Image: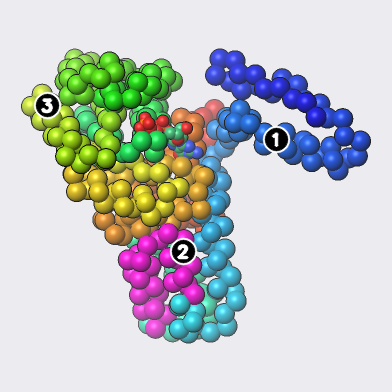
């Protein structure tokens, strides 16, 4: 079996593919392997997926989380004949194992017990919808969470190494640009040499302006220049990529304080957000990071990345329940369209693969705007 993969102008092409296996089964196996070989092929797959509607991408992205949580729950709903203590205990186990966290699990199950009692529910399977509604209620962030998109705003983005901060800023810039907003990006992660370069690529892709810092330069100076540029160009949103790392809390606090002071002084009318980016694949560790960041910064929201590659998407519920910080966006892939506003209704419908009329309408709207 032979194949070559070539990258040209950022696009992955599979140049040639041949298979000399004699039997049809082994040929099919080879083709199956080819289908999944190499990061390049993965990327070309996600390019094709860009054309998919919003809801479908979310459903696909949440496959592993769904397999982890929902299939376990469904086997309890279908396997039990009575609603008894064992039934609740098994549900508790599935929810906790699914990374929803102790707090959210207890809240959800308390509500379920109450409804079972007041509505005289007898059949375990009837609990499914109650649970879906209760998770939705837990996670509702409301439209006010996205006010910064409509205002002249400065958004500071923090998070530890490798969680997807730069990628997320690029995606967010793309999203705002598609709404015809003027976007300026500040490369204030001057700590890591490649960070500025990476942001530059995203700025080009999203057609946003970049104010870049030299490696090792003062991040506060980059913020100063970026604020001046945002004001001069009448930008709608200034997104700041920081090196906001946690390993030295005191330094981080000091760095954030300096940057915030400049924004307060130079851009007092701007609407402010501080968003922490967390990698969903790290599960409980993401929750711990959110707690730590919350101690050093006034976090206004969370962006959970890599929801597509994880069975631990339940962590979104835990973060909201335990910290009261809204999850505002989720990342479900590596392309510019793979950042989605967190809407509890759509998220839970996608998690349980319950397609509703409004999701279908959103899909049509989304597909139309992509065409
Ligand atoms: N599958 C998937 N991958 C993602 C997502 N978001 C980011 N990534 C990938 O995660 C990796 C790290 O992303 P970066 O944006 O470089 O992370 P960072 O937090 O800026 O890292 P530093 O600059 O080192 O602090 C990259 O390979 C991204 O393509 C997502 O939602 N899904």
Point out residue 169 in the picture as x, y percentages from the top left corner.
Answer: 35, 30
Ligand 1 image-quadrant field: top left
The residue tagged with tag 2: helix, strand or loop? helix
- Decide: marks 3, 2 in contact (CB < 8 A)? no
Residue located 78% across and 37% down the image: 30
Q: Quadrant of residue 274?
A: top left
Element type at marker 1?
helix
Q: Is mark 3 within 8 Å of ligand 1?
A: no
Q: Residue furthest left?
A: 265
Residue contact at pointers 1 and 3, CB within 8 angstroms: no
Give the residues in magenta.
Answer: 90-117
Q: Which residue is most to the front?
A: 248
- What separation in Å lies between label 1 and label 3 (alpha carbons)? 51 Å
For this rendering, which residue is in front, 284 or 251? 251
Name the residue tied to disc 3.
262
Label 3 crowd (10 A; few <14 / some 14-19 / many >=20): some
**Cα distance in 3D space between marks 1 and 2:** 32 Å
* Mark carried by residue 97: 2
Using the numbered discs, state the Cα–Cα distance from disc 3 to disc 2 in whole angstroms. 44 Å
Judge whether 340 appears above or below 310 on screen: above
Q: Can you identify the residue that label 1 sits on? A: 35
Which structural element holds mark 3? helix
Name the spot of residue 112 as percent of width and height, x first. Answer: 40, 74
Could you say where residue 62 lies in the image, as x and y percent from the top left?
Answer: 51, 49
Give the side of residue 102 with respect to residue 25, left or right.
left
Q: Quadrant of residue 232?
A: top left
Quadrant location of the N terminus in the rendered image: top right
Observer able to see residue 76: yes
């Amino acid at each position: 079996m032979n194949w070559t993969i070539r990258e040209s102008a950022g696009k992955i092409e599979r140049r040639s593919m041949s298979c000399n296996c004699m039997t049809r089964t082994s040929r099919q196996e080879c083709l199956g392997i080819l289908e999944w070989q190499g990061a390049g092929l993965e990327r070309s797959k996600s390019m094709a997926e860009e054309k998919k509607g919003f809801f479908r991408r979310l459903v696909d992205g949440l496959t592993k989380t769904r397999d982890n949580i929902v299939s376990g729950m469904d086997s309890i709903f279908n396997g039990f004949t009575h609603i008894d203590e064992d039934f609740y205990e098994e549900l508790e186990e599935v929810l906790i194992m699914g990374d929803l966290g102790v707090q959210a699990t207890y809240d959800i199950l308390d509500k379920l017990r109450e409804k079972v009692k007041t509505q005289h529910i007898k059949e375990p399977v009837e609990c499914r919808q109650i649970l879906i509604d209760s998770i939705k209620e837990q996670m509702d962030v409301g439209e006010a969470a996205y006010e910064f998109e409509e205002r002249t705003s400065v958004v500071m983005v923090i998070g530890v190494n490798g969680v997807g901060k730069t990628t997320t800023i690029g995606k967010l810039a793309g999203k705002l640009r598609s709404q015809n907003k003027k976007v300026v990006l500040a490369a204030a992660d001057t700590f890591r040499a490649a960070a500025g370069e990476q942001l530059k690529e995203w700025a080009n892709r999203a057609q946003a302006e970049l104010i870049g810092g030299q490696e090792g330069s003062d991040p506060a100076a980059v913020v100063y220049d970026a604020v001046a540029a945002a004001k001069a160009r009448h930008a709608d949103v200034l997104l700041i990529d920081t090196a906001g790392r946690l390993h030295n809390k005191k330094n981080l606090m000091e760095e954030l304080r300096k940057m915030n002071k400049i924004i307060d002084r130079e851009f007092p009318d701007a609407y402010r957000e501080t968003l922490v980016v967390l990698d969903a694949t790290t599960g409980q560790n993401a929750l711990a990071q959110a707690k730590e960041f919350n101690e050093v910064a006034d976090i206004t929201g969370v962006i959970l990345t890599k929801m597509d590659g994880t069975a631990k998407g339940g962590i979104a519920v835990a973060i909201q329940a335990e910290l009261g910080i809204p999850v505002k966006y989720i990342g479900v892939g590596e392309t510019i369209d793979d950042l989605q506003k967190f809407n509890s209704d759509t998220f839970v419908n996608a998690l349980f693969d319950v397609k509703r009329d409004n999701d279908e309408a959103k899909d049509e709207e989304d597909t139309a705007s992509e065409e």
